[in-house]
Each structure stands twice: as C-alpha cells, then as structure tokens.
Amino acid sequence: MGKLKLNINDVTPWVTKEEINELADAATMANMALHDGTLLGNDFLGWVDLPSSITESQIEEIEKTAIHLRTHCDVVVVVGIGGSYLGAKAVIDALSNSFDWLQDKRKNPVILYAGNNISEDYFYELVEYLNGRSFGIINISKSGTTTEPALAFRILKDKLEREVGKEESRNRIVAITDASKGALRDLAMNEGYKTFVIPDNVGGRYSVLTPVGLLPIAVAGINIRLLLHGASEIEKETSRDASFKNNLAAIYAVTRNELYKRGKKIELLVNFHPKLHYFAEWWKQLFGESEGKDNKGIFNASVNFTTDLHSMGQWIQEGERTIFETIISIEEPNKKVKIPHDELDLDGLNYLEGKRVDEVNKMAELGTRIAHVDGGVPNIVITIPELSPYYVGQLIYFFEKACGISGYLLGVNPFDQPGVEAYKKNMFALLEKPGFEKETEEIKRRI
Ligand code: PA5
C-alpha cells in the first residue's frame, strides 16, 4: 500500500527547513499533549485513538444498520449541521460516482442532506423530491438541541409519518446523539428509534470516524473498514512518540503556523478534482472552528481547480500577498479517458491525441503551482496515490492530527467553538424563544 506524502519544498524562501526544524520540539510536545491530555480541551480528545479503538462489534452494528436502511429506502436524508454532516458528505462525494444519483438503475440509495440551512425553498424542494419515494432519515446532533437539524427533522418526520405511518417510520429513522442528554435523545427514547452514541469526548468536527460519519458513509455503499484502516495507518505514524521527521501532520502544522507568522494569513485548500469540493468544506470547518479564536487564526478557504483558475485565479496570482496554498494531489485517477483524434483538428487539440485527460490535468496542476509560487504564494502539497476509502481515511486523520497540533502551537483551545453561540443568541432573541425575554427586549431596541 502507498502512503500520503507531504512536500513543503515550495514554502521556501518564506520559511526555511531550518526554521521549521527549530519548532520540532514544540510540535512533538503538542502531539504528546494530544495523547496525554495535558493541554487545553483535554476532555475532547476521544478522536485521537478512534481508528484503532473502534471495536468489531461497533463496526458490525453500523454495517447492519446501513444494510437495513439500504434495503428499505431509495433515499436517505442525513439531517445535521457542521460536524454532524460535513464529514459524511466529504467522504461520500469524494468516493461516489459523480453522476450516480442521476441514474435510474442505482446500486446505492440517493443520499441527501437537510438541517444544514434554514432555506424555505430548500425545504419545499426537498419535500417535493421525496414525494412518492421511499425515504429514511439519519438524524444527527451531538447536543441534540441545534435548531437547524431539529427543524428539518420535525418537517421530515411529519412527512414520513403521514406517508408510511408511525410504525414504519420507526423502521426508517436512526438517531445519532449524546448517550443520555439532549432533546434528540429524549425524542429517540420516546419514539423507540434505533440510536448510536456520539462519545462525550469527541467534538462534532472530529466525529467523522464515529457513527456520525460512518453510518451515512456505509449507507452510501462505501467500505468503512478501509476508511478506518487508512486512518489507523496515520494514527500509528503520528503516535505519541513519533519523531518530528516522521510525523507529517506535525510538519504540516509547523509549516502553516510559520507561514502565518510571516503574514500568510489565508490558507487555500486546493483540489483538481470536483469530487473533493466537500472535502474542503469539511477541512474548512475543522481548521476554522478549531483555530479561529482569541482574535487569531489562519482564515481557511478553498478553491476547485481548474474551475476557479478562471475566477479566483487572478486574485491568487496577483492580489494581496497574504495567502498560501495547500494542494491535495491525486497521483492516479480511478478511471481512464483518452483524448480522441479529430480529422479537421479545428480546435487545434490533435497534439494531445492519445493522451489521458489526467496528463493534461497534471500539467495544469504543475503549471499552476509554478505560477503561484513565482507570484508569491507558498505551496504545500499533500499527495495520495488514489481516491479510495483507504487514502481518504489517511487524509482525514492526517488533517485532524495536524489541526490539534497546529491549534496548540497557535496557543488556542482547538476543541471548543464559543463564537458559534453569538448568532444563536440573537436568533433566539429575535424569534422570542421562551427564556430569552431579556435578550429579546435588548435586541429589539437595536433594530
Ligand atoms: O464541531 C462542532 O462541534 C460543531 O460544528 C457542531 O458539529 C455543530 O454545531 C452541530 O452541533 P450538534 O451536533 O450538537 O447539532
């Protein structure tokens, strides 16, 4: 089996290898702290050994439930927001056929998402799509009290019960939530839904390798054992006592922190495959929520190339020099498409005849990297041999570990998200939620 590789050659001259090595001890200590629980947020470190500690019976239970949903439903709606859906969507999109959900004869159920927005049109159109289709729901909320998924679940549960009755609805609803507390736990107990537990010590954005991610991923027909296997390989490589030179997650964490100190305040996660779009969304949440606090932290953004070379490409090449790029590079695509000969050659593309499309994509990737480095944008490259469950598992754990180390190097608690409460408080006050009377009064004075 191949392995994830990290290339930081193109961060010089902004940061030298010597400067990175100077932080080896600090990064190694940060990594140890994640294992020993000696720094901030130590009650949220359950993700550190998830790949190696998940038991056979836990995996079997997830697989059994996935088969049950696949047998009973043509469509499964994953209800959740933030860490409660992004990991699943990232993996499912990365590893599924891009056009699978448009096929009439399908091997896998269509996976849709709700509870990650409050758009009325989205709700209407989703409910409309579900008309006449046999659907099920995986309702995910760690706190069990988040408004967006609660609202979506209320609407979808009502629809399902009207269509198939309460009894059959129970057969098609799975709840994933806290072991004992929260409104979703109470509701699931009351209704008798099948449930899975999100461990107390795993925060939402680090929960993709718990049932939060694993169940929807398995329902989509993806091998979760290979995903976990890939993740556990990187868990081993970045173990408590791993040396800095072998700990690629630590090297990445140090490199991005050093770039940040030198004014590179924005990190763009770059891909050359549209299937990775949502992987970047997951990554943005992971790093953004973990590091953006105490008035510091890299701003995480993402671009899909070559698409965005025709939109943001200009800014990246010549705009303010405050960015660096982290590229996810895929060595070998899963499928082959060759460029055909054309008699007239009016498009002038016969010079590419017989080449694979990926050869063109790879030259676009290399050409872009060289251009951006020349234009003042440091590049970090993370390469995996192919897009498969095993390597996506490696990427997931690599970024999770890097994020924990990076947050500690930055001096923040990478496992809380106090800032997320501000909008909720205002929304509840504006909606006149019981218990928010004082806030309602205050906010009404301001508008
Ligand atoms: O990472 C996090 O903790 C958050 O993004 C949560 O996942 C998100 O707010 C959803 O929370 P919950 O699962 O409690 O509904």
Image (spheres, rainbow, N blue to C red):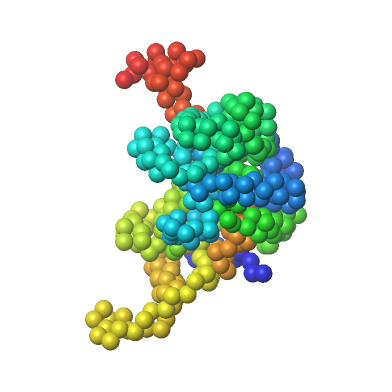
Residue under the image location 48 percent in, 51 percent down: 110
Which residue is nearer to you in this view: 213 or 206? Answer: 213
- Image point (45%, 55%), residue name: 101
| Residue visible at 64% across and 37% down in the picture | 194
Q: Is residue 58 visible?
A: yes
Q: Is residue 381 above or below residue 60?
A: below
Quadrant location of residue 171? top right
Relative height, residue 260 to residue 153 (above, below): below
Residue 172 location (% of width, % of height): 57, 40
x, y (%) of residue 248? 63, 60
Direction from residue 1 to residue 320 in the image, left or right: left
Q: Quadrant of the N terminus?
A: bottom right
The image position of residue 42, as x and y in percent, is 69, 37
Can you give x and y, in whole percent of width and height, for residue 427 in the image? 42, 25
Quadrant in the picture for the C terminus: top left
Q: Nearer the viewer, residue 428 or 238?
A: 428
